[in-house]
Image (spheres, rainbow, N blue to C red):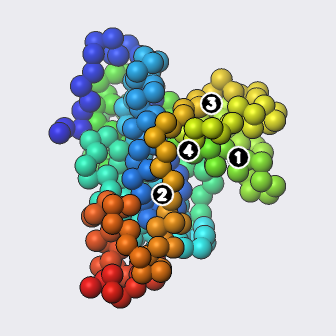
Amino acid sequence: MSGYIDEPDSMLSLPRVAFIACGCFSPPTPMHLRMFEIARDYFEINGTHKVVGGIISPTHDSYGKKGLAPSLDRCAMVKLAVQSSSWIRLSDWEVHQPQWMRTQAVLQHHQNYLNNYINSPGDEEQNGPLPGWLPLGLRDRKDPIRLKLLCGADLLESFAVPGLWAQEDIEEIVSNYGLVVITRCGSNPEKFIFESDVLTKYQRNITLITNWVPNEVSSSLVRRLLGRGESVKYLLDDLVLNYVMRQGLYNVKSKLST
């Protein structure tokens, strides 16, 4: 399958959008990728946007979260996980910065790069090779691409945790980029938005999408099972699981390694 997405003529004039997911991805699970597919379906079935690409940006090693594998390993696992996708790609820009980057700064870098690339004359090789996360066919049109932060409802709710997010960052993310929130059936993100003055102010930039096929497999659950010596077969992509075993990540038990 090529990197281009076949589309009806009716989509050629729609505004363009790309999704970026930020987080640990330690390890990346199938649900991380399913979020991209669910979001693309929603936008394209509703005929509101043309989705041009999906970007996974693992966090910097200095983030220091428990269970965080080295960025070299996390990037390698993401590359393996997206091998079967024609439009979701890894960005390793964040992990190569001198220190941990705020989510707002990650969004700003990728948004600026996308639109600078579209408007540049075309001789980009003089500035070095293009990043691997850059979607194909961007210069087919000259209109800008809007980058949106793709996340689960847990990230949306984390905005209310005291000291976790700077209020100015929340406002800039929601006002200048927008959120695409994949929620669980039965959750009530609308109430959470109502209770936040900032989110209510920019709620037109928040897209809520219900995932009707629940999947509770998380990275922390996978790490727990691996540490106990239990099987995670079919909970991870086989390529990712084989990598975990070869590298001995997450205190994987020796019997699994063999």
| Amino acid of disc 1 | Glu
Mark 4 vs mark 3: which is more N-terminal? 4
Residue 184 lies in what quarter of the image? top right
Relative depth, front residue between 221 and 125 = 221
Residue at x 47% of width, y 80% of height: 228
Q: Position of residue 120 (x, y in %)?
A: 37, 33
Residue at x 50% of width, y 37% of height: 211
Assign the C terminus to one quadrant of the image.
Answer: bottom left
Q: Secondary structure at mark 4?
A: strand
Residue at x 32% of width, y 56% of height: 81
Q: Is residue 9 above or below residue 200?
A: above
Mark 1 vs mark 4: which is more N-terminal? 4
- Evaluate if marks 3 and 1 touch, with contact meaning CB atoms under 8 Å apart: no
Q: Position of residue 163 (x, y in %)?
A: 79, 57
The disc at residue 206 is 3
Mark 3 vs mark 1: which is more N-terminal? 1
Q: Position of residue 125 (x, y in %)?
A: 27, 46
| Amino acid of disc 2 | Val
Q: Secondary structure at mark 2?
A: loop
* Residue position for label 4: 151
Foreground label between 1 and 2:
2
* Residue position for label 2: 217
Q: Residues within 10 Å of mark 2 (few under 14, many from 20)?
A: some
Foreground label between 3 and 1:
1
Q: Is residue 69 above or below residue 139?
A: below
Q: Is residue 45 in view? A: yes
| Amino acid of disc 4 | Cys
Tell me the CA gap for discs 4 and 3: 11 Å
Residue 200 lies in what quarter of the image? top right
* Residue position for label 1: 157
